[in-house]
Image (cartoon, rainbow, N blue to C red):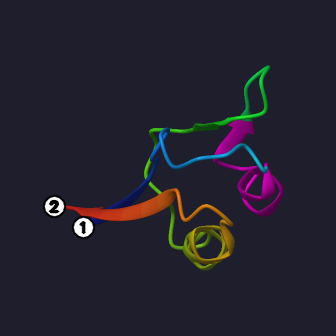
Amino acid sequence: MSVRMRVNPIACTGHGLCAELLPERISMDEWGYPIVSPRPITPVLEALARRAVTDCPALALLLEKER
């Protein structure tokens, strides 16, 4: 089972904290909104990904388990 991250573009307000916490999977576009990599979150990065989800001021990030 793999874990992927996605962003709710409607909820996101472009704070950029997620990209600071998880630069391995999140970059910022030219307007300051996150671009989330479609690659699965590796077990090594899972704790950092969970922190990014928890610390998002707009609660716009989500981790999803895939089979």
Residue interval drawn in magenta: 16-27
Circle 2 is placed at which residue position? 67
Q: Residue at x 52, y 56 (%)?
A: 60
47 vs 43, nearest the viewer: 47
Question: For the residue marked with disc 2, what is the amino acid?
Answer: Arg
Residue at the right extreme, as displayed: 20
Q: CA distance from mark 1 to mark 2?
A: 5 Å
Question: For the residue marked with disc 1, what is the amino acid?
Answer: Met
Circle 1 is placed at which residue position? 1
Q: Position of residue 50 (x, y in %)?
A: 56, 75
Residue 53: which quarter of the image? bottom right
Mark 2 crowdedness (10 Å alpha carbons): few <14, some 14-19, many ≥20: few
Q: Position of residue 45 (x, y in %)?
A: 61, 68
Q: Is residue 41 above or below residue 37?
A: below
The answer to whether 42 appears left or right of 26 in the picture is left
Q: Residue at x 45, y 46 (%)?
A: 8
Residue at the top extreme, as displayed: 30
Mark 1 crowdedness (10 Å alpha carbons): few <14, some 14-19, many ≥20: few
Q: Position of residue 25 (x, y in %)?
A: 63, 47
Q: Secondary structure at mark 1?
A: loop
Dot 1 or dot 2, earlier in sequence: 1
Q: How many marks?
A: 2
Q: Residue at x 43, y 52 (%)?
A: 40
Residues tagged 1 and 2 counted as in contact (Cβ below 8 A): yes
5 vs 31, nearest the viewer: 31
Image quarter where the C terminus lies is bottom left
Q: Is residue 43 magenta?
A: no
Q: Is residue 58 above or below residue 31?
A: below
Residue at the left extreme, as displayed: 67
Q: Position of residue 62 (x, y in %)?
A: 43, 62
Q: Secondary structure at mark 2?
A: loop
The answer to whether 65 appears left or right of 10 in the picture is left
